[in-house]
Image (tube, rainbow, N blue to C red):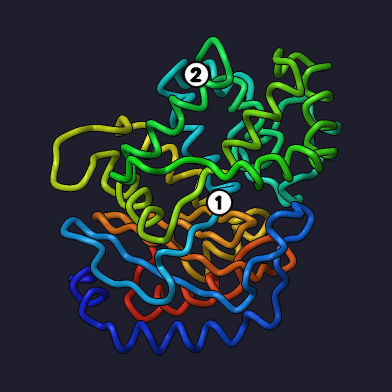
Amino acid sequence: MIIYMLCEDQDVIEAMIEEAKKYTSQGKVADYIPALQYANQNSLAFAVYSDASTCTTAGNIEEQFTLQSISKVITLALALMDIGEEEVFSRVGMEPTGDPFNSIIKLETHSPSKPLNPMINAGALAVTSMIQGSTNDEKMNRLLDLVRKLTGNASISYNKEVAQSEYDTAFLNRSLCYFMKEHGVIEDNVESLLELYTKQCAIEVNCKDLARIGYVIANQGKVVNSEEQIIPLQIARILKTFMVTCGMYNASGEFAIRVGIPAKSGVSGGIMASIPNGMGIGIYGPALDEKGNSIAGMKLLEGLSKRYDLSIF
């Protein structure tokens, strides 16, 4: 019923998007990764995917953007499928943090010195180091294959310019890696790991692709209209739990109260949401709030959740 209402209320959705776009002037496009600074601050695109099709869209849904931190959800799924829960969570925790996504504080003050969760940068770097493969190319191809399966889009690749820009300026992530290497959380060559991680973050999608990934996670790991279990059921549940508790950086608690939807954001302006009972949402709005989330995207999801009673709580 919720899906039907969302898919039929095109005029209402359009009006809500126009209202949310008013907030873009209060945000700021990410510029600490130089290649991201050229995004149109006023952009806002939206897609909903259900078990039938991409049923509702608005804005420039074909505009491509990089996954950035949304990729953390997918690499976690791949690492869990590769080596299992016990090994992954022996090196990365399961607890939320109230600190910024790139903070080193908890690594220094907690014992053992492992990242609190896979959705912060330190945790994501550790997870990326667990992806199986003999070379970075092999690991990246395995990750791209998974993204292509999730989206049904065989043309998906990564943006080389964004990846290089992120690699060249990844000074804080280098610090996180060296700290974790000192404490045995990672064993990889730091520069090699950063090369893979920045390519992972630079995987390019559009809103429809993002909505389809969100749908598969919402649909217990199964692809649309198929019994193919792309992501095992238990892993899909883990992903949704992390999205609720840690997915919106250090705004996750407030987001859970105001919106109540499993979601993951990225500093390119993307937000992926997975609504139980089979609905995925993809949003792109590059103007960010002070915590790194799409400011218009957050407002839009809050409005949608209230109007259609989408909260899982």
Q: Is residue 209 left or right of residue 100?
A: left
Asked whether, in this view, residue 240 is left or right of residue 264, the answer is left
Q: Which residue is mark 2?
A: 138
Of 230 and 253, nearer the camera is 230
The amino acid beneath tag 1 is Thr
Q: Position of residue 100 (x, y in %)?
A: 75, 51
Q: Secondary structure at mark 1?
A: strand
Query: Callout 1 environment at 10 Å: few (<14), some (14 to 19), or many (20+)?
Result: many
Mark 1 or 2, nearer chain start: 1
Considering every residue shown, the one lying at the far top of the view is 134
Quarter holding residue 108: top right
Q: Which residue: 75% across, 14% down?
A: 184
Left or right of 116 in this view: 260: left
Q: Is residue 60 left or right of residue 163?
A: left
The quadrant of the rendering that contains the N terminus is bottom left
Q: Position of residue 60 (x, y in %)?
A: 43, 72
Label total for image? 2
Mark 2 secondary-structure assignment = helix
The crowd level at tag 2 (other Cα within 10 Å; few <14, some 14-19, many 20+) is few
Q: Is residue 173 above or below residue 58?
A: above
Reply above or below: 139 against 163.
above
Q: Residue at x 69, y 65 (%)?
A: 38
The one nearer the camera, 73 or 140, is 140
Which residue is at the front of the view, 113 or 197?
197
Quadrant containing the C terminus in the rendered view:
bottom left
State how far apart marks 1 and 2 are (Cα).
20 Å
x 85%, y 33%: residue: 109
Q: Residue 262 at what x, y percent from top left? A: 44, 54
Amino acid residing under circle 2: Glu
Please provide percent x and percent y for residue 150: 33, 41
Numbered tag placed on residue 10 in the rendering: none
List the residue tagged with mark 1: 66
